[in-house]
Amino acid sequence: MTNTNGRSAANSLRAHLSQSQPKDIAQAFIDQLDAYYAHPSSSYYIDKLERRFYEQKLRHLGWKPNPDPNIVTFGASGTDMCDRQIFFKNSATKPEKSTDEPFRGRQRRQGTAIIDFVQLDLIHMPKRLGSKAEFTIEETDDGQYAFEDAVKVWKVFERNGVKFAITAKPDGILDYQGRQLLFEYKTKATGLVAMNGKLDFKGADSHHLRQVTAESLLFGINEGIILYESTEKPSWFSDEDKKSVPKTRKTWADGKPKPDLWAFHFVITEEMQESLLADLAEQARLVYEKQIPPMTIEMTGKCAFCAFKGHCKSQLTDEEKTMLFEAERRYATSNLAGKYDHNNLREYLGGVQVEEEAEQ
């Protein structure tokens, strides 16, 4: 249910991106960023602007509960969760706390830290670039920079007789030649070459497209920019002629560094919004009616950041276990053996036993 609708909405948006949207908006944004970071003063912040930025951050420190805890609420960035994760998250189920690989904690910290500096850089661009800064951070009516908690929204929707809420606090709301644009920033830690290959081939990630679709419903802004940045940077000097660097790891080509930034300009349609709302309404209905959603193979692709995997496995029916193990055996004897989907399924099945095995 969710996965099918989610892919449909994402594919529809991806087609809209590739076929009908001018690419110059995304490129113009990249050009502005490049001009700023090439500027000799980009490493130095203006005291007045920096102080204002951090004072705003301080004002919004602290946990703020949703207005009505009895209404199932979806965070915009979490609208791509599988049905079962949504169910456990909104029930009395406690999240599982377990240790993680240390580098993952550092990776999360890195992504969280960088966005602060991207926002601070956007604030400085008009001062450094003058009229060449066409993309600027908007300000709220009370004089705050329009990003994160300063523009956080919680709004109730109703579809098919089911009430639910969506909340969001985007990384920014930009002004571009009098047009409002939603702005979301994402880091990629897979490496420079891998990021370029994936984004060039597949475009923006589907779960990020669902996130900005949700944000468009809250802010009434139907277009924006998703910016990706690789945390790996090109070699300081060209590595094209270095024999010690394999061809698949070279970070320069044709005398230029490979891009460490990718921007996608998106436009959200009413069809995309309605598809998402119908999807969320069905997820919320299952929560209200206390029905554990049936397990699907596709769900195992979303377990990496789920804090309810143990609960999920403990609630599998014998039929679901049989279905999953049969799917794993088919994967193992196909050309998909050992690839992404197969590995996700094998990872999920760790510790899961079918009834016959448990009795032996």
Image: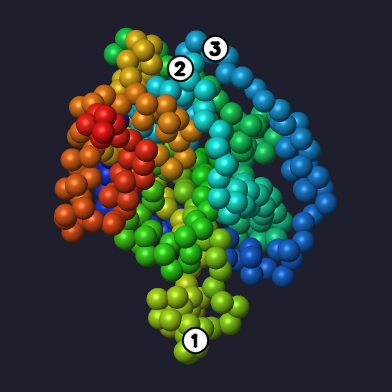
Packing grade of label 3 (10 A; few <14, some 14-19, many >=20) is few
Distance (Cα) linking label 1 and label 3:
59 Å
Distance (Cα) linking label 3 and label 2:
15 Å
Residue under label 2, please give it. Answer: 91
Residue that appears at 42% across and 59% down: 24
Image quarter where the C terminus lies is top left
Residue 310 location in percent, x, y? 43, 31
Residue 60 location in percent, x, y? 71, 31
Return the mark for residue 244: 1
Residue that appears at 48% across and 64% down: 191
Q: Quadrant of residue 174?
A: top right
The reply to whether the C-beta atoms of the residues labelled 3 and 2 are less than 8 Å apart is no
Secondary structure of the residue carrying tag 1 is loop
Distance (Cα) linking label 1 and label 2:
54 Å
- Mark 3 or mark 2, which is nearer to you? 2
State the residue lying farthest toward the front: 360
Return the mark for residue 68: 3
Work out whether mark 1 precedes mark 2 in sequence or the reverse, and give the earlier one.
Answer: 2
Asked if residue 85 lies left or right of residue 231, the reply is left
Q: Is residue 41 above or below residue 224?
A: below
Under mark 3, the amino acid is Asp
Q: Quadrant of residue 202?
A: bottom left
Under mark 1, the amino acid is Ser
- Mark 1 or mark 3, which is nearer to you? 1
Q: Nearer the viewer, residue 62 or 34?
A: 62
Packing grade of label 1 (10 A; few <14, some 14-19, many >=20) is few
